[in-house]
């Protein structure tokens, strides 16, 4: 087995995974520590080392709120360890490979975790790459800076470093991807067959990387899980890029809150002090959470780039869970619903109100719809209008999820299934869940290998056919308690909303 590998900075030694046919390399530096003068700079080259570096443990997680101290579903689900090491020195990645030599050129997955660009880390237990590695895929998980340390924008930064004034967490991801291109052949991977993937903010990160022209040729396909959003009602600015001016004003307010005047002073502050003060400010609405249109890394809204075909056009797999990010019309009664419908749909308000779904009322509002489902399908329809459209495969994750909290298909729960890591979860999953996870991981592996999820499962059985989602053929793959089930969209209400999407 390949236990020692070369990198551009020196040799690294990995350990056998639970399956000794797989080797894991944890905590490989892909950039210099972003500390001191490197704080709020684009990632710099890592230093060389002599001898063989033992890569046996995950590196410290990015500076963020301490995990595992609350009782929310995510603290119960996987952010379980408040003692996990944390450091501003965090630019490391991890590799799982079942290669026996450095000459095998296996397909590669580069994974970006989610967490609202505020939380998350590569060592979360659901991100174990072993099951994919057993399917002959080299898995790489890349860490990146978060919160104010990863996404600060400030006028002084714009003046000092105009070519990289912000988006540092996104630049970390990009640096990790380019490190993979340069080094992954030494781990048995194929640098010309890379898939980038992520979920939630990680999915949004994939969208941003696809919109960045500097990444041309660095990946062949992409997976966006719960990372595209659209609303037929109010435009949600949370998901829109900000201008340098908008984001810079937030940076000025953060400096005032930190008690500093200059960038030099801010770079000398303790990272945990910045974290604590930023957390206070964030809880009052001042969040650094999205990419900024800086004219370099980000020149366009990634969703718009997908719709109009200006992104890096590669095949995409994307979808959502059934119960996440539901949008509503917030109206006190039927009369206000009519007024809101006229506001949102103008001359088509009566057509909207004629749908039974428009009159559905919950304790949160009228007319519930899935924002990520609309976002994914809207983007895929945009691709289908392009010349020589690339295949786009839509899924919806809707099985039963066990547990005393009756959680439904909550945001992120599908990660246990795609990575086939259910055995690490505390939920009482049954055989049907393991069968579904195996199918989902098989589809994912097939897509990573050749841009098409179809083919055989790990046991050699033909998977149910999954066709692309296009304007002419609204094909879906439903991941249910009874396994993968192909379907065709026939929801006229949803199709109306897609036509009217903002």
Image (cartoon, helix red, strand yellow):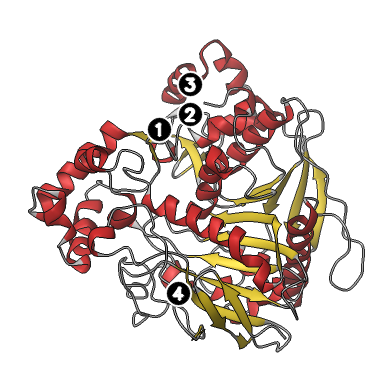
Which numbered disc, 1 or 3, marks the residue closer to the eye?
1
Sequence-first disc among 3 and 2:
2
Q: Mark 3–mark 2 contact, CB under 8 Å?
A: yes
The Cα–Cα distance between marks 1 and 4, rounded to whole angstroms, is 40 Å
391 or 212, which is in the foreground? 212
Residue matched to label 3 = 344
Residue matched to label 4 = 76
| Element assignment for label 1 | loop
Residue at 43 percent of width and 19 percent of height = 339
Mark 2: give few (<14), some (14-19) or many (20+) Cα within 10 Å: many
Sequence-first disc among 3 and 4:
4
Residue matched to label 2 = 233
The Cα–Cα distance between marks 3 and 4, rounded to whole angstroms, is 39 Å
97 versus 43 height, above or below = below
Sequence-first disc among 2 and 1:
2
170 versus 11 height, above or below = above
């Amino acid at each position: 087995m390949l236990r020692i590998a070369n990198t551009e900075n020196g040799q690294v030694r990995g350990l056998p995974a639970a399956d000794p046919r797989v080797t894991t390399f944890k905590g490989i530096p892909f950039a210099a520590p972003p500390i001191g003068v490197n704080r709020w700079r684009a990632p710099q080259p890592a230093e060389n080392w002599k001898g063989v570096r033992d890569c046996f443990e995950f590196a410290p997680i990015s500076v963020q709120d301490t995990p595992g101290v609350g009782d929310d579903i995510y603290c119960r689900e996987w952010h379980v360890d408040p003692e996990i090491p944390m450091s501003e020195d965090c630019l490391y990645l991890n590799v799982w490979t079942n290669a026996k030599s450095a000459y095998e050129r296996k397909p590669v997955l580069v994974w970006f975790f989610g967490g609202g660009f505020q939380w998350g880390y590569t060592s979360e237990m659901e991100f174990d790459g072993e099951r994919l590695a057993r399917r002959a895929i080299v898995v790489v998980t890349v860490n990146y800076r978060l919160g104010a340390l990863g996404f600060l924008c400030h006028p002084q930064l714009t003046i000092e470093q105009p070519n990289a004034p912000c988006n540092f967490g996104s630049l970390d991801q990009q640096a990790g991807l380019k490190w993979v291109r340069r080094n992954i052949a030494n781990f048995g991977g194929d640098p010309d067959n890379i898939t980038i993937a992520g979920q939630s903010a990680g999915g949004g990160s994939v969208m941003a990387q696809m919109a960045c022209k500097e990444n041309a040729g660095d990946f062949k396909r992409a997976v966006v899980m719960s990372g595209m959003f659209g609303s037929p009602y109010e435009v949600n600015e949370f998901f829109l890029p900000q201008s340098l001016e908008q984001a810079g004003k937030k940076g000025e307010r953060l400096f005032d809150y930190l008690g500093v005047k200059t960038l030099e002073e801010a770079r000398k502050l303790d990272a945990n002090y910045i974290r604590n003060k930023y957390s206070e400010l964030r809880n009052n609405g001042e969040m650094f959470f999205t990419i900024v249109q800086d004219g370099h890394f980000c020149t366009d809204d990634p969703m718009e780039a997908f719709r109009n075909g200006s992104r890096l056009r590669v095949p995409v797999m994307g979808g959502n869970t059934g119960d996440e990010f539901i949008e509503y019309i917030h109206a006190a009664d039927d009369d206000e619903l009519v007024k809101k419908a006229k506001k949102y749909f103008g001359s088509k308000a009566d057509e909207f109100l004629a749908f039974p779904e428009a009159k559905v009322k919950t304790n949160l509002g009228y007319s519930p719809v899935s924002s990520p489902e609309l976002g994914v399908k809207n983007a895929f329809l945009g691709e289908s209008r392009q010349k020589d459209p690339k295949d786009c495969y839509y899924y919806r994750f809707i099985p039963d999820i066990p547990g005393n909290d009756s959680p439904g298909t909550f945001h992120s729960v599908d990660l246990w299934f795609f990575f086939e890591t259910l055995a690490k979860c505390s939920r009482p999953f049954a055989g049907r869940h393991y069968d579904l996870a195996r199918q989902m991981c098989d589809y994912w592996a097939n897509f990573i290998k050749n841009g098409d999820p179809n083919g055989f499962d790990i046991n050699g059985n033909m998977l149910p056919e999954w066709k692309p989602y296009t304007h002419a053929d609204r094909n879906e793959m439903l991941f249910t308690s009874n396994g993968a089930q192909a379907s065709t969209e026939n929801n006229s209400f949803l199709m109306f909303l897609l036509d009217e999407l903002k």
